[in-house]
Amino acid sequence: MTNTERNAKYLAYVERKSPKASWLKSLLHAFLVGGAICVFGQMIGDILKNIYPLMDINMVSAWSSVSIIVLTVIATGFGVFDKLARFAGAGTVIPITGFANSIASCAIEFKKEGLVFGLGAKMFYVAGPVIVNGVTYSMIVGIIYLLISML
Amino acid sequence: MGKKIGSQTYELNNKVVIIGNAATVGPKEGEGPLKEYFKYIEHDDLMGESTFEKAERKMMEKTIERALKSCGLTENKLDLLVGGDLLNQLVTINYSARDLAVPFLGIYGACSTMSESLAIGSMLIDGGFGDNIACVTGSHFSTAERQYRNPLEFGNQRQTYSQWTVTGMGCSVLSNKGKGPRITRVAMGKVTDWGIKDIANMGAAMAPAAMSTLTAFFKDTKTRPEDYDLIISGDLGKLGSDILKDLMEREKYPLGKNYVDCGHMIYSNAQKAFQGGSGAGCSASVFNSYIISKINENVFKKVLFMATGALMNTTLNQQGESIPAIAHLVMVEK
Amino acid sequence: MSEVLLMYLKVFLVGGLICMIGQIIVIRTKFTTARILVIFLMVGAILGGFNIYGYLVEFAGAGATVPITGFGNALARGAILGGLTDGFFGALAGGLLSVSLGISVSIGLSYCVAILSHSKTKKE
């Protein structure tokens, strides 16, 4: 048996032997928490629309996101967000809470190395790929649409 | 002086005794199943310092101090300090050694450092290159997380096959005279890589290395697993040790009830460490507390202590490389 | 009243479903959080680029905008709109501009919170 064959067999064996997470429970947790966070966002938006009926729809959506971000960052600062995340898994990663927590936790962690080289440089350690890929793709999309609209 | 027997094993002919030792652990370990054996439990894993790195260093310095105190040796009687840690450039031990006026040899074996340092220390004493040598290593959960994985406040869900890095230190003082458990044989491991790339599954990455060293030792010494009271691996964890048992069975050296794993023993299920403890501090703290106590109490008379290490870094892992591992073994007898 | 309840039900179900799909991916593959965030972002951006995601937003409101897919959609729509209103430079800047409030607040508030707090000891 060559090393490659042995490794492939070993990997398959390890896959079989590794304990699987309790699927159902974790899916339920993710569903419940994720849904609840979205409901919270909707609530903020609706409350704002009630108080300021003339507010632009984009503004409403923006305020909704911002309130979730603020709560997430503060919860991270108090060291409690990760407890919810352990329970909810993707339920806190997928909503905007995941993005905000990744920035806040990196900032808090790397502050020890100073504000410039620690906090400043490593704040986007996890969230960086999100912004880089998102912005690059959006530029491509924008240009393509522009070109199509000029035809 | 001793000699090499077989492919990887060295027989020590002169007396190498563990005359003193100490282990210090953090709060989580201090609440685990081995808490009765841990004489020094730090309830604040920041140790009153401003960073976790400083805390880890303080924990190591105190452990070395405690080990020396346990055998009445002072620093100036030590011929050499051998050891390592998990942080980049071995900063924990380098900076701890800075304050000790002792010649120092820094080594990196990842989580296998305890048995690696014991192996080197005992071979040097056997060869007449010193009377008293201290072997030390350890790890800290918070510093390891931030170097190898994620910031502490990061909200990720741990995988069920992952392990928890132990906050703990262990130091053994070896000598060519005095009373205590004796190191009689040593086996140096070979780097083994069976292609595992998932850094959350260290147990699976290291089990082949443990199998490789153990089978080489049995072949070299013409002994079998049943000849020993205890065979203990460093931090394979529950999954890793189950894999090792299967691998050893295939090699026709099946491991029985006398095989346990430090990582599996150090935390209870309730502590949610999933596969158990990992880190250099795991094997170091368990060896220098539980194992040595049991040997002194005559519960175990012939012990094979084998710590395993995963020799990767995050950069290469992100580049798609797999995780090579190594296991070093020391035989400790009453 | 029942309209409001129905809306909230849709928000809950769609938001929860998107997160549940994320959890399935976490379990089946061993992707890190960063990789999953990027995948969902790109899905949202691509659907936004083809003008499909907007229907989900109309249907489920915050259930579509709160997940990171909504972020991706906002990026894509922002770039398209920017291109149509401000030409070439609008197309380049429009994406980042549309999510700039969220990013600015994340950065600024994280900075302040980081100065005031520190990582806590973890036991689980």
Image: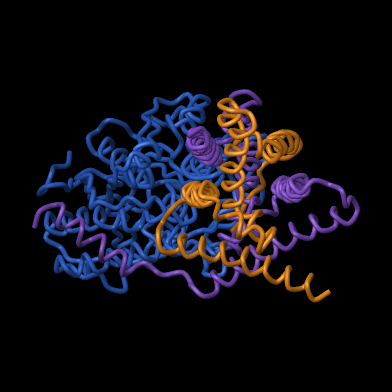
Chain colours: A purple, B blue, C orange
Task: Please report the residue visible at 67 percent of the width from the left and 47 percent of the height from the top.
Answer: C120
Q: Residue furthest right?
A: A51
Quarter of the picture holding the C terminus of chain C:
bottom right
Position of residue B313 relative to residue B256, above or below, is above
Residue B116 vs residue A36, the one in the foreground: A36
Residue at 20%, 45% in the rendered image: B190
Closer to the camera in the image, B7 or A118:
A118
Please indicate whether residue B201 sits to the left or right of residue C119 in the image.
Answer: left
Residue C28 horizontal/vertical position (percent) = 41, 63
Q: Which image quarter holds the N terminus of chain C?
A: bottom right
Q: Residue furthest front?
A: A151
Q: Is residue B166 visible?
A: no
Q: Nearer the viewer, residue A15 or B30?
A: A15
Of the pair B82 and B128, the residue shown nearer to us: B82
A33 displayed left or right of B170: right
| Residue C14 x/y as whole percent | 61, 66
x and y percentages locating residue B122 in the rendered image: 29, 41
